[in-house]
Amino acid sequence: MKQNIIVLLCFAICYLSCKDQSKTSNSVIENRGVISKSAMVVSARGEASKIGVEILKQGGNAFDAMMATEMALAVCYPYAGNLGGGGFLVYRMADGTKGALDYREKSPLASSKNMYLDEDGNVIKNLSTIGSMAVGVPGTIAGIFEAQKRFGKLDVASILKPVIELAQNGYKITEKQERRIASYDSLITAVNEKEILYNKKLKAGQTLINTALAKTLQRIADNGRDEFYTGETAKQLIDYLQSKGSIITLEDLAKYEAKWRDPISFQYDDLTITSMSPPSSGGICLNQIMTMVEPFDLEDYGHNSLRTIQVLVEAEKRAYADRSFYLGDPDFVDIPIETLTSDMYLQERMKEFSFQAPTPVDSISHGKIIAYESNETTHYSIVDQFGNAIAVTTTLNGGYGSKLYVEELGFFLNNEMDDFSSKPGEPNYYGLIGAEANSIAPEKRMLSSMTPTIVEKDGEFYMSVGTPGGSTIITSVLQTILNVHEFKMTMQEAVNAHRFHNQWLPDEIRMEPNSFDKSLVKQLQNLGYNINEERSPIIGIVDGILMQEDGTLEGGADKRGDDTAVGF
Ligand code: DON
């Protein structure tokens, strides 16, 4: 009997330690995520994190791993990982130099301000969200090549090799993935007028092979960035898009360029926070909110306490009201960044704040709104063995973007055009309203909320963090940083913690359901806050990496997704 138990125990230990390599090379402490000594990749899928780490182990750096991880996500997380979308990178080199790359989609040359309005000036339902008119000119391939060319060390063919193998040999469908594909199935089939590779027959545990995508990636590995923008792939893509009625042309693709931007940097206590600048609203809004809340003793109030929620919500309200009016593509509109982020302006903005009652939304600005919530973007964080750190958020916008799937090429196309303001004051998919600053114009980039963020402490790398979640991205990143800094959580606790959100309009605090104490909710309601616990089953799927005091890295992979940290 005893012998049997020992055999069983040995088997169990062997099984557990052989099952998942990512867990053998890293230790997992309770309440902490995966710990590693020199490098780490955290992304929405284990396969993508492992491929990123494989590239690092071959001697590549964070920018080589970026190309591999981003393309691996396009293979095994087509919900948001993409070739047909865009994104933002914020980096901090080992020597402390920081920067940002904008590979956001662009509006086609043939686009126009009122393209989503009917003759009476009303927004045509679904035109900016579903099908070919919703698609913006994709930036992802330009972005990963630009970053890798400037900072990478390996050759593109070796970086893409494991990704192509993943597409060729397949990956396992997870339970969450099975559910997601099933729930989008009828819409995807309707838009494509046939069943595509991703359809409701796919079951968890099944292996999915995408040969068309493997071929596309192989051509990109052979011919480089231009394969996508002027080569065979470009031609196939435009033929397909135009057959579906798109206004995007070969000229649009040929003109696309990723752009280096100066990120937004600001201080909060002893932290230096660096995040994405316009055309994302992430950095500016995060800066505004954190500056508005800095004078309050959040640590003393406590995590998710009544006072903490009040302070954060009121600051968020004001920042989102500014977002809707002032922010857009900096190549097209002048944004008063200095004023918007100045202490004087923000103190003035918070002057009406009171713990006694909410500041009425109309007194901040005007608008009418409905909202919708989901988590269809994806974020990954990488720290390499050389000390470079990156935060990257990439998206197709909605889940599977416009739902248009290019069968010959093996990928979905974005519906990023909906991030423009189709009509002043009219809410988009995320319930965000915009003004002239974010109106449509040829070659303009649509305003984003994506907030890839790097945090430094005492001049050293401290944290890389980001999340999907549309309009809730900014407030999820905010809460994660505060969870670590103010409420002393580990990275894993910080990403898992329950979240809430306010975006000025609609006039409500969204809270994750069954996550907040009923009496706390009642207290907020008694003060005059509208609480909505139904809108968002989850708020954000945050991934992050934290430098611990002993110099090791802790990966925080949000329990809300299939997210996985792998390191060495
Ligand atoms: O750029 C943006 O702000 C949006 N397109 C992000 C979309 C997103 O996060 C989807 N997940 N909810």
Image (cartoon, rainbow, N blue to C red):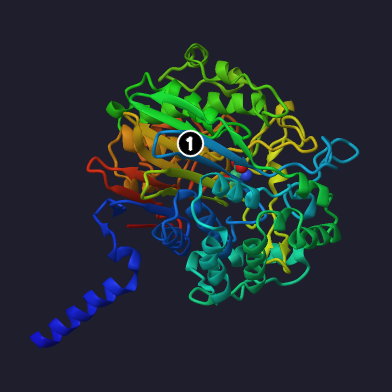
Identify whether 108 is placed above or below 166. Answer: above
Local packing at callout 1 (Cα closer than 10 Å; few below 14, some 14-19, many 20+) is many
22 horizontally vs 441: left or right: left
> Which residue is painted at 42% across and 53% down in the image?
42
Query: Of the residues shown, which amino acid type is indicated by label 1?
Result: Thr
Whole-percent x, y for residue 502 in the image: 52, 33
Q: Which residue is mark 1?
A: 475
Query: In which quadrant of the rendered image does the C terminus lie?
Result: bottom left
Q: Is residue 352 depicted above or below 251 in this figure? A: above
Looking at the picture, tell me which residue is in the foreground, 234 or 560. Answer: 234
> What percent of the width, then of the height, locates residue 179?
54, 66
Quarter of the image with the N terminus in it: bottom left
Identified at 75% across, 30% down, the residue is 424
In the foreground, 251 or 520: 251
As drawn, 560 above or below 525 = below
Rendered location of residue 471, percent (x, y)? 57, 39
Residue 464 position in % (x across, y down):
41, 42
144 or 293, nearer to the observer: 144
Horizontal side of residue 229 vs 270, given as left or right = right
User: Quick check: which quadrant has ligand 1?
Assistant: top right
409 left or right, relative to 314: right
